[in-house]
Amino acid sequence: MNILGISAGFHDAAATVLHNGNILFAGHAERYSKQKNDANIHADLLKDALVHGVDHVAYYERPWLKQLRQWYAGQGIEWNKVTLNQVLQQQVPEAMLYLPTTSTHNHHACHAAAGFQTSPYDRATVVVIDAVGEFDTITIWSAEYDKNSHATYRKLWSQHYPHSIGLFYSAATSSVGLRPLDEEYILMGMAAYGNATAAVGMQKLVKDSDRIEFCDNLHTGIDSKYLQDLEEFDIAAGAQSIAEQLINSVMRRARDFKFSTNLVYMGGVALNCSANRNLGKFFDNIWIMPCPSDAGSSLGSAALAWKKRITWTNAYLGHDIAGPYPVADLLHALHSHGIVGVASGRAEFGPRALGNRSLLADPRSPDIKERVNDIKRRQQFRPFAPVILEEHVDMYFDMPRGFHNSRYMQTVARSRHPHIFPAIVHRDGTSRVQTVPSDGSGIRQLLEAWYKATGCPMLLNTSLNIRGEPMVNDRADADRFEQLYGVKVCS
């Protein structure tokens, strides 16, 4: 059976096709529409998905319950989005021509399923932290497979709207002039330049750090009385510090249920890799699916409809630019110019480039960070990530407890040699590490060739886009990037 999982209508729409536990396709609408954070399914995304055929459509939340929460929040009810049929007719009319069976699933349950059913674990504690689903903002679950190999979930604890770590962090993002539900990752990068103790007034927002309760409804933003005329970098540092305290409180509660020492962590807040370095204090083994936010719940809804374990190999699940990975061309460009783009193979599922839609550079050069930030039209304080041969990671980075690897840039680690690799070390001495195993992938082949030629087992890796635009998706996008920004893009 082919199951089409859909997340759409709010932000970062996505579609996944699952066939008997195998992921045939997973992609983001924004990569097709060229509109960052696009909320709506794009016709070309659907075309890539429906080439496989669809027997069942699974949706990532319960529309009527979401409308009830919006009414409760004073946002009113969108009467044309109360039923799944209404939503599907707006988002995927072509799919309705097939008259497949349909199902709706709880928002946080979809996050949990996307994580647990792709994880290597038979039994795990699952934590979901995001802005808001229908009403849940934080959930803790027990997850295991029953005698029929069906994934079973039991909710152990939850917090509800409007008390939300995700909404708090988005409100802080907005308070420094960044786009909420989009540029939270920039706020995370800013935090290293600020003074969290200067933002002591922000702590007064937290009413109860154990139950994760806030004094105000932060869906409407942070009142200026809590900010005390703070500098933007101090707001960022304060927000990051508070978020980490609250996430740690959730993880402590989850650990104390004593269900499993395996952690599956999902929801948009799971993308905060600076906070993730603390997870090993609470759990022995950690799995964060590379697309833990709402887009990943397109996979989660399909997973719940399928019920069983999903075969997980890698995150290269999107649009395919056919052909061999251009190792020789990339190596030549790196030696000649220090910076090169690559658009080859299937696009990454998730917000982070992992070598198939990447801008790559020599991390040893002192001017590379400035040059790459100029190309991407980004603020100069913004950090870049290293991608490294996995067997070398412990020689160059002090990996946090619980992370035996970081194949999807899930955590930061302290650099052991920051003076040698200035392009990939942040102000606080950490790097958002991507490790690459011996998997035969294109980026693995390139790293092996680069290491053989230079003795350096890593490259700088950032997404092939400029600020405010989605990642390159197809060959036409790659040609446009090359022409506009003067960087060779190899395919």
Image (tube, rainbow, N blue to C red):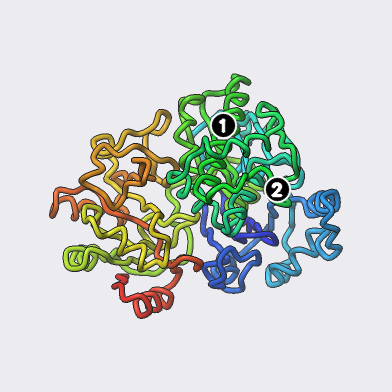
Q: Nearer the viewer, residue 176 or 388?
A: 176
In front here: 23 or 225?
Answer: 225
Type of residue at label 2? Asp
Instruction: Give the class, few, some or many, for how many residues have Cα within 10 Å of label 2's Cα (few <14, many ≥20).
Output: some
Quarter the C terminus occupies? bottom left
Q: Residue furthest front?
A: 229
> Residue at the spot x=70%, y=29% of the render?
208
Residue at 24% in and 62% down:
327
* Structural distance between the alpha carbons of marks 2 and 1: 21 Å
Taking the image as shown, residue 441 lies to the left or right of residue 28, namely left
Hey, which quadrant is residue 480 in on the image? bottom left
Packing grade of label 1 (10 A; few <14, some 14-19, many >=20) is some
> Which SS class for mark 1?
helix
Q: Nearer the viewer, mark 2 or mark 1?
A: 2
- In the image, is 213 to the left or to the right of 370? right
Residue 196 placed where, x, y %?
51, 38
Amino acid type at mark 1:
Gln
Secondary structure beneath label 2:
loop
Taking the spot 21% from the left edge, 51% from the top edge, the residue there is 448
* Residue 204, disc: none
- Which is nearer the eye, 102 or 33? 33
| Horizontal side, residue 230 vs residue 190: left or right | right
Q: Which residue is mark 2?
A: 223
Can the viewer see residue 115 in this picture? no
- Assign the N terminus to one quadrant of the image: bottom right
Q: How far across and down, in percent of the image, does residue 148 sit?
A: 63, 33
Q: List the residue tagged with mark 1.
A: 245
Q: Is residue 164 above or below residue 452?
A: above
Image x and y of residue 282, in percent: 51, 24
